[in-house]
Amino acid sequence: MKRLFSCIIAVLFMTCLSYSQTQEKSANSPNVYYLSAFGAISDADIEKNSTSFGTDNTAIIQKVLDKALLNPIIVYWDGKYSVTGLTIYSNTRIIAFEGCGAILRNNSDQCLLSNANWFASNTDCNISVQGGIWNGNGFNDALTPAQTHDNAKEGWICALRFYGVKNLTIKDAIIYKPRTFSLSAQNVENVFIQNVKIDVGENAPINCDGLNFVGPASNVTIRDCDILAKDDHIAFNADIPLELKWDSLNTNLYKNFYGNITNVTVDNVRLEGGLFGIRLLSCKSRIDNVTIRNIHGTTKEYWLVIDNYWQNAFPINNPGNGNIGTVLIENVHVESEGKSVPYVNHTYANIQANAECLIFKDIQRNRFAEDSFPSILITGKDRTIKKLIVEGYNSSENTETMPKTTNHIEINGTRIKYLSVSNSIVTRDYPSNNSPLLCVKNGGSVDCLQLDHIFCQGINNVVDVQGMITHISASNIIHTDAGPEEGTFKAAGQIAIPDLILTNYTGEKPTCGTGDFIQTRGDGFAGNVVPNKLRKGTYTKKKTVLILGNSLVRHSPSPEIGWYGDWGMAASVKDSDLVHLLISDIHHVDPSVVINFKNIADFERNFDTYLLSNLDSLKNPDMLIMKIAENVNDQKAIDDHFILWYDKLIKYIAPNDQSVKVIADGFWAKESINRLIEEYAIQKGYSYISLVGLSKDSTNMALGRFKHSGVAIHPSDKGMRMIEQRIWVSIKDNFNKK
């Protein structure tokens, strides 16, 4: 009996414990609310240019939001409402139905949405806004503000304001017409913003910005956004100027507006024409571990600024010359419209702060609206950048625009300890001018400059030294169409360059200028630097060209691997593959030249059994360009004496000694086959073009554009252009001018 009684007691105890745990779990589960069920009236026009507000729903909606004080809530925003400003508490998730949202009523002079403890030292957490149209109604037109710019109670009047929030998510939302910032955030951690469209209005007044962050901030991700701002589209301000009219009234809050900003990713953002694109502002507070990639669109002035507040017209709360850690900037194609305001440095990217490491990769620039508008400007005395790496800068001026003169990369008054520029192209279709790839001036200096795989056409100098460069190491440099007496490296005035190493150089003149190159080393100074071992004017002009290649030359459609083109594999369009780029360059000089090309990948794979008679219709060209290697098995090339069959093929196709033979190795790194081809070309005295180093730069491949890896490792449009330019420089003097 005692045992039975004990069992009953145990069962009752476990039942009570289970019930208690169930009750506790239920208490922490979010409650779900629909605004319309509480009497909110959906009668507002919330679109961008609305002035029709309908019912004031502030009290009803705030009553729902206040429920988060007791329990986590999910609020389904199921209408179009007007309000005078709403407060959001911790553990609130707002989900707006399509086309629904809110507009701030005229003269509200508050933020449309703000977290509860924005002014306090403690923080809120777990706030999410998904979907919705959020109209800040900052002004009815450019001359009639609907809200004050700022006031002593609220500070800046923003559309969305989140200060002191941990775990903040904003997704799939539209923000219209704020009086100042579309989103203002400070002292935030773990922020995720995705698929947000911001439109401040075409005629917005000054200070209407996009996404604005003030330190401290960490773990911020911004993805897939489309932003039209008046000033900054996106800004990260580790420190801010004390220029606020109401600062004296809120001394303790606003003078503490600074702190480190770390672990930031900005990815796939379109800039829609505001003054400035992305800003990183640091005086003493640290900005570090920042990645900015896939940025497109237009700005009126620079798309990027990294500085310590250029105006210097107001006191700074934490003054200093900048404290930037590592910033990676990758795949940028933004065009600047030109000089729009008089008080800034006119440049595509403006750097004016101390920095540890700045990396620019795959930067495209094709529009030059103004003279003296550098692509990258490093400026400011008493500033030092320890490492500046530019990998994949691509710029072209063509005859569709008016020619401009500018320094592409300009070091103006700043010290760079290590500068690397590689895999970069500058081309102009005009008579040459003073638009160097790199210019060091006005007391600027570089301790060590390293250049590799550079192609420049139509500019007088690759490097124009008006400051100081202590050591230059340059390799794989192609410099063509410079002006008379101009050279690849220019030392101006009384400048003395202590050491210049130049190897694998193609150009007419390595050095020039009134300055002095104290020590020059490398085969670039051997005196025989024009390709094919011949000087201009000694070529026999050619009328037929044959290009034998593989899938880089042409690949028919293969839907099973996601390839639908009928041209060089992975090029975005036919005219962007290496063959059609080469055809364009040749025909620009001599339209009468006949150019044939063929994919002979079968020869690469089975060179010892391939029937050369398959190529009979292509025999006896004036010029033969061999672009094969990638599909040759390295070990088979050695075991089965590939070079014997390679030589047999060349002699079969172009037996005439007057036929020019141009030999290119492989785009991919294959040690044996590329070495064999190079040795063969040198032994025969044929023009040899090395391409293998190009694949070391991932931006020269179409990675990410195709799911099939075999397609994606082929050259991108940039890679195709790099290959074509190396071939074109080697052969162009073989053709008659028009």
Image (spheres, rainbow, N blue to C red):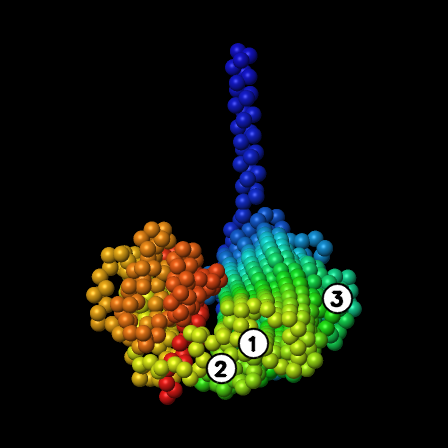
Q: Secondary structure at mark 1?
A: loop
- In the picture of the structure, the residue carrying the numbered disc 2 is 481
Q: Quadrant of residue 650?
A: bottom left
Residue drawn 55% across the image and 17% down it: 6
Crowding near pointer 2: few (<14 within 10 Å), some, many (20+)? Answer: many
Badge 3: residue crowd in 10 Å (few <14, some 14–19, many ≥20)? some
**First reached walking from the N terminus: tag 1 or tag 3:** 3
- Locate the C terminus by quadrant: bottom left
Seen in the image, is 93 located left or right of residue 321?
A: left
Tell me the residue that label 1 is attached to: 510
Question: At label 1, which amino acid type do we have?
Answer: Pro
Residue 702 seen anywhere in this rendered image of the structure? no
**Distance CA(mark 1)–CA(mark 3):** 41 Å
Q: Assign a secondary structure to mark 3.
A: loop
Disc sitting over residue 320 in the figure = 3
Instruction: Report x, y in % for residue 85.
Output: 61, 65
Q: Nearer the viewer, mark 1 or mark 2?
A: 1
Q: What's the residue at 26%, 67% (across, down)?
A: 652
